Amino acid sequence: MEIKQFDVLVVNFSPTRGREQKGMRPCIVLETNGFRGEGSVTIVCPLTTQLKKIFSFETVIEPSSINGLTEVSKMLIRQLRVIDKTRITKKIGRLERKYHESVISAIAILFDIRGDFAENI
């Protein structure tokens, strides 16, 4: 199966340890298309339908026929995972372009790419 950045996949995360997300769940592919077809791993962000707390850096995604989701979900940006592609059970859709900037901004916050949270040394 060919996968591209922003594809929505169902991934089997089990087995896991501690507070890692587990079980079968939808994920967004974050890895650039520049690595497409290279190697047996990719980088994904799991989604959850647990929406009790939504932080400013979490992207909420409405279900659609394009993305293949059946419930409102949010990205668990702090649960990014490098997975072996054998964990992918199926591709269910693609994340619409209207969400792309929000996802990229969340990654920038997570890794402090803009230096907004760097301590003065």
Image (cartoon, grey):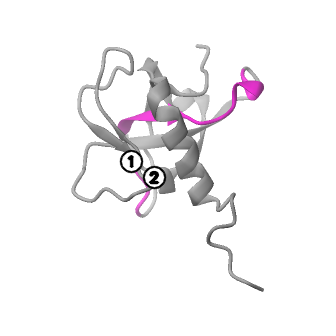
Give the x, y percent position of residue 93: 43, 18
Residue at 72 percent across and 22 percent down: it is 36
Q: Quadrant of the C terminus?
A: bottom right
Magenta segment boundaries in residue numbering? 19-36
Residue sitting farthest toward the bottom: 121
Q: Do we see residue 36 in this rendering? A: yes
Q: Residue at x 57, y 58 (%)?
A: 109
**Residue displayed at 56% across by 48% down:** 105
Q: Quadrant of the N terminus?
A: top right
Residue 10's image quarter? Answer: top left
Marks 2/1 in contact by CB < 8 Å: the verdict is yes
- At label 2, which amino acid type do we have? Thr
Q: Position of residue 73 (x, y in %)?
A: 30, 39
Rendered residue at 24%/50% (across/down): 51
Label 2 and label 1: CA atoms lie apart by 6 Å
Residue 64 position within the rendered picture, expressed as x and y whole percent measured from the top left: 30, 20
Depth check, front residue: 108 or 86:
108
How far from the left and from the top, in percent, is residue 83?
59, 39
Q: Which residue is mark 1?
A: 22
Circle 2 SS class: loop
Per the image, the residue denoted by label 2 is 16
For label 1, the crowd category at 10 Å Cα-Cα, with few meaning under 14, some 14 to 19 and many 20 or more, is: some
Taking the image as drawn, is residue 81 in sight?
no
- Frontmost residue, 9 versus 86: 9
Give the mark, 2 or 1, whose residue is nearer the N terminus.
Answer: 2
